[in-house]
Image: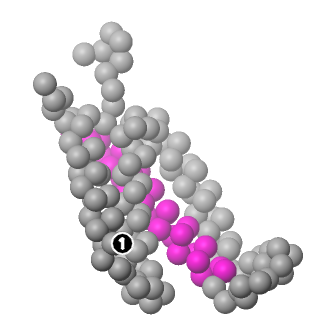
């Protein structure tokens, strides 16, 4: 018998949405921080260029916010439930990369995102928290 999905608490839902948004910001700002670096740049030149780019600091700030948010989410939901939801950032990053960074969307990438969405949908149909011993 398949367990009936429990209603997702608003705090968990908000935390998951924020996790996706922050991960999207992190990935896009990482890309913007290294955009324009020459292919053969030395590690020192790469570090110097990145450290002088404002997008690097936006990414670091988002990492800090993501750490705090993720601790709050995991205090309220199972990791095996919450982590797959962060895969939704693949969709948001793909969309922004396509429109803003003019990256090509191949049919294989689109199919991959479709499979990710199907997986997240299936996981969303399960309880967000595993019943503990002594808990109904």
7 vs 93: above or below: above
Q: Position of residue 116 (x, y in %)?
A: 32, 58
Q: On the rendered image, what quadrant is the N terminus found in?
A: top left
17 vs 9: above or below: below
Residue 117 location, quadrant: bottom left
Q: On the rendered image, what quadrant is the C terminus found in?
A: top left
Q: In the rendered view, does 34 fall on the left or right side of 11?
A: right
Q: Residue at x 33, y 10 (%)?
A: 134
Q: In the rendered view, does 48 fall on the left or right side of 63?
A: right
Q: Residue at x 21, y 35 (%)?
A: 6
Residue 81 location, quadrant: top left
- Magenta highlight on residue 100: no
Task: Please name whichever residue, 103 or 101, is drawn nearer the observer in this view of the structure.
Answer: 103
Q: Residue at x 29, y 52 (%)?
A: 120
Q: In the rendered view, does 74 fall on the left or right side of 14?
A: right
Residue 15 is at least partly visible in this image: yes
| Element assignment for label 1 | helix
Q: Position of residue 37 (x, y in %)?
A: 71, 86
Residue located beneath label 1 in the image: 109
Q: Name the magenta segment's main secondary structure.
A: helix
Task: Please name whichever residue, 89 or 57, is drawn nearer the observer in this view of the structure.
Answer: 89
Which residue extends farthest left? Answer: 1
Category of crowding for the residue at label 1, using alpha-carbon neighbours closer than 10 angstroms: few (below 14), some (14–19), many (at least 20): some
23 vs 136: above or below: below
Which residue extends farthest front? Answer: 108
Q: Residue at x 35, y 80 (%)?
A: 106
- Magenta highlight on residue 17: yes
Q: Which residues are magenta?
A: 7-34
Task: Please name whichever residue, 9 or 124, is drawn nearer the observer in this view of the structure.
Answer: 124
């Amino acid at each position: 018998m398949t367990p009936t999905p429990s209603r997702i608490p608003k705090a968990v839902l908000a935390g998951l949405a924020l996790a996706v948004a922050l991960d999207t910001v992190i990935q896009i700002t990482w890309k913007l921080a290294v955009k324009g670096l020459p292919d053969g740049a030395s590690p020192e030149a790469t570090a110097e260029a990145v450290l002088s780019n404002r997008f690097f600091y936006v990414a670091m700030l988002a990492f800090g916010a993501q750490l705090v948010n993720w601790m709050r989410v995991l205090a309220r939901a199972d990791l095996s439930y919450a982590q797959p939801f962060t895969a939704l950032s693949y969709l948001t990053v793909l969309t922004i990369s396509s429109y803003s960074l003019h990256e090509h969307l191949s049919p294989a990438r689109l199919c991959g995102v479709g499979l990710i969405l199907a997986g997240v949908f299936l996981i969303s149909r399960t309880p967000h928290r595993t019943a503990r011993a002594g808990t109904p």
